[in-house]
Image (cartoon, rainbow, N blue to C red):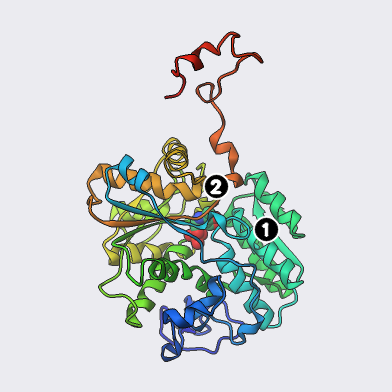
Amino acid sequence: MRCRECGSEHEPARLSVCPDCLGPLDAFYDYSEVDWSEDSLSRRPRSLWRYRELLPLLDHGKAVDLGAGLTPLRRADRLAKALGLREIYLKDDTVNPTYSFKDRPASVAVSKALELGYKVVGCASTGNLAAATAAHSARAGLPCYVFIPKGIEGTKISQAIAYGARIVSVNGTYDEANAVASRAADRFGWALVNINVRPYYVEGSKSLAFEVCEQLGWEAPDHIIVPIGSGALLNAIAKGFGELRDLGLIEGRGPKISGAQGQGCSPVVDAFRAGRDSIEPVEVPNTIAKSLAIGDPGDGVYALRRIRESGGFAEAPSDAEITEAIRLLGRTEGLFAEPAGAVTVAALKRLVASGAIEGDERIVCYITGNGLKAPEAVAPSEADILEISPTLEGPGAEILEVGAWRT
Ligand SMILES: Cc1ncc(COP(=O)(O)O)c(C=O)c1O
Ligand SMILES: [Zn+2]
């Protein structure tokens, strides 16, 4: 492990931050060990564990693998046409084992917690990580405590309950739930995946860079759009592209990386737009993208830096724009995303409108969570449902005759 701030190096032990300066720790590897030839990869698991040389587990036989990762990269020509673009791909992480990208970091973190000898795991969560950690801890046979703020989607709580987790509902914001969870981890000696196992946890998400490049025939896209909550995901994806470049597996400087948050909780986007280097926390987040409602993002400054270094942009679409993006994605491509996933499409739309995106770029939108986790985002309106009596001759049905309804 290497400290991102002071550069000191440490053994991959029970470490959540740099013991010297409390800075964040990044994993590094023996890069000469990597063999990702087509032949070698074809014999590997169809999950993120295929990239084992760059995952922080010492004994790979101990991986807790529910099959997270290796999700489809879908070319989205109908969406591209609707937005006036040439080449869009959707990285469809809605089809992970618990239906969000969080299965990636959870799989790595629960595996590492086992390796480090922890007996209890858990997390602080805006919803998706709760389900992902609960499922992987069930698979590992470890008890799991999830700390959640008030107001998250009931579906996500049900999921975590079904996987046997103990739910600790904290009467406050996500940041407050996170602070309480952190104290509980210290007091009880638990491994909370995104808190004291965080340096290992974040490594799972960089597989989202590896897969996109592998799926494009070891080419990097020109531009990627990534949702931001804590900023860990964006930072990890950027690290992943950097590792591929260092390994010579992709050429060029890597994609532009743009970030997306919901209006109502956009501390990173606000800092980007204001040209600031620091993040001003949002006291009380209020966005339909509840999974991204983190007012004081732990990796916010690093995400901001990554966006700037890559030449990318940042946008914070409104609730209405996000809901419209869910429907646009659904009706053009048959993909149903939760608000935190479709926010990248809403941001893309803004970037096209502002002229920031050029029409001939090869773009990848990361779609990180499944729409069935937050179905209330597509509450039916009168325009969606035609009510008729149980006959095709009755009142209302004549409109079907002329084919006039919702064309
Ligand atoms: C669906 C979804 N997308 C994106 C994110 C953002 O990830 P991060 O908090 O690592 O920035 C989250 C976080 O919970 C999420 O649930
Ligand atoms: Zn340090």
Q: Is residue 193 above or below residue 372?
A: below
Amino acid type at mark 2: Lys
Position of residue 365 relative to residue 232, above or below, is above
Please, is residue 299 above or below residue 4 in the view?
A: above
Left or right, 278 with respect to 45, comes to left
Q: Position of residue 51 (x, y in %)?
A: 50, 78
- Give the CA separation, mark 2 to mark 1: 15 Å
Question: Residue at (59%, 37%) from the top-left corner?
Answer: 376
Q: Give the percent coordinates (x, y) of residue 381.
A: 53, 25
Residue 6 shown left or right of residue 173 in the figure: left
**Which residue occupies 34% across, 78% down?**
249
Secondary structure at numbered mark 1: strand
Q: For the residue carrying disc 1, how many other residues have a C-alpha within 10 Å: few (<14), some (14-19), or many (20+)?
A: many
Of the two numbered discs 2 and 1 in the rendering, the one whose residue sits closer to the viewer: 2
Q: Which residue type carries mark 1?
A: Phe
Judging depth in this view, the residue of 133 and 193 nearest the camera is 133
Q: Quadrant of the C terminus?
A: top left
Instruction: Find residue 225 and report its image quarter.
Output: bottom left
Q: Nearer the viewer, residue 70 or 151?
A: 70
Q: Which residue is mark 1?
A: 147
Observer able to see residue 27 = no
Q: Residue at x 50, y 68 (%)?
A: 205
Looking at marks 2 and 1 on the same chain, the residue that comes earlier in the sequence is marked by 1
Q: Which mark is residue 290?
A: 2
Residue 70 is left or right of residue 121, and the answer is left
